[in-house]
Image: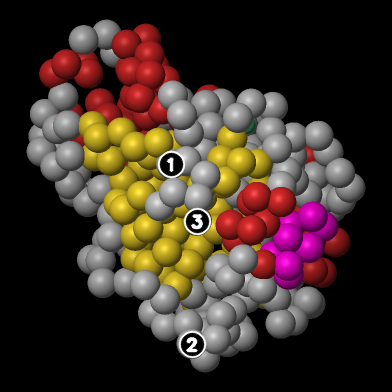
Amino acid sequence: MARAITGTWNNAGVRGTMSMVDLKIRPAWPGMEGWMEILFLGVGEACDPAYLNTSLLVRPEGAKACTAMLDCGFTVPHRYFLGCGDAEQLEALWISHFHGDHFFGVPLLLLRFWEMGRRQPLRVLGPAGVADRVTAAMNLAYPGLLERLTFPLEFSVVADNEGVEAAGMRWRGAPCEHAQEARAVRLDDGGVSLFYSGDGRPTPASAALARGCACVVHEAFNFAGETVGHGSVSGGIDFARQAGAGLLALVHVQREERQRHAGEMQALLGSLKPLRIVLPGVGDWLRF
Ligand SMILES: [Zn+2]
C-alpha cells in the first residue's frame, strides 16, 4: 500500500514533533515500490509575503538528505539555509522558468554555497537558455563571483521526452502554458514518481508527463475556472485524477484567492477519495 506521511519541519530543517499521519492513499501505479519525500520551502506566488515563493526540496529513497531543489525564487535561499548546515547536500537545482519568483534566488544560493566552501559540482537543470540566464543573474547580482566559485556548475537542458539523470533520479520535462516558456518536470526514482508543474496551466504534454505519478504538485493560482497562463484548484484536481495520482499538493495559490476560498479549499481536503488533496504550508513535508 502506497502511503503519504505529512508533517512539519522546524526552523532547523528537522522534522518537528507533530504526529505523523499515515494517509494510506491508494497505490497510484500497480506494483509501485519505494518512496520519495518532499519538503516545501515555500508554497506561495510571487507577491505573497506569508507563504514564500513556491519551492520544493526532494529526497529520493536512499539519500540521507534532500538532494534536489525545484525552483529558487527571491525568498527561497534564506528559508533553505535555515535548515542546511552542509553545503554539499544539494546535488541538483531545477528552474522551471525565468520569472523572479522561480529563479532570482539562485545568486544568493550560490553566494552562500561559496561562502560555506562547497566543492561538489551543482547540476542546474531547466529550459533552453538556463545557462545564459543564470550567468546573467549572477553577473548582475554579484559581478565576478561566478569566476570565483569553488565548485562547478553543470548545466543541462531538459527537453521534451528526453530523460536527464541527476541526483539519483531521472528528470523529464514538458511545456506548460504560461506568460513565458515554462516547463513542468517529472522525477522518477525507481518505482516512485513526482510531477511538479512549476508555473502554468496544464497542457496535453504536461498531462502525458504526469501519467502514473504517485504525487502531483500543481500550481493553483485561482480557485476555479480557466485563466490564461495559470492553473486552478479545480483544474489541478482534474489533472491529478487523469494522471492516476494518489496525492495532489496544491501550491502557488494567489494570496487573495487563498483567503477568499479558504473554507472551500479546506472542505476539499480529504473529500475526494481515492485522491488525497493537501494544501501544504511552509515547512510541511510529504512522503509518498
Ligand atoms: Zn511565472
Q: Nearer the viewer, residue 130 or 257?
A: 130
The amino acid type, in three-letter code, at marker 3 is Arg
Q: How much space separates mark 3 and mark 2, taking CA atoms?
A: 19 Å
Tell me which corner region of the image, top left, top right, bottom left or bottom right, holds residue 36: bottom left
Density class for disc 3 (Cα within 10 Å; few <14, some 14-19, many ≥20) is many
Task: Give the label, 1 or 3, closer to the camera.
Answer: 1
Residue that label 2 marks: 31
Residue that label 1 marks: 158
Density class for disc 2 (Cα within 10 Å; few <14, some 14-19, many ≥20) is few
The image shows residue 158 at horizontal and vertical percentages of 43, 41
- The residue at label 1 has a CB less than 8 Å from ligand 1: no
Residue that label 3 marks: 186
Extreme residue toward the front, this view: 161
**In this picture, is 196 found above or below 124?**
below
Q: Secondary structure at mark 2?
A: loop
Q: Residue at x 73, y 67 (%)?
A: 242
Tell me which corner region of the image, top left, top right, bottom left or bottom right, holds residue 94: top left
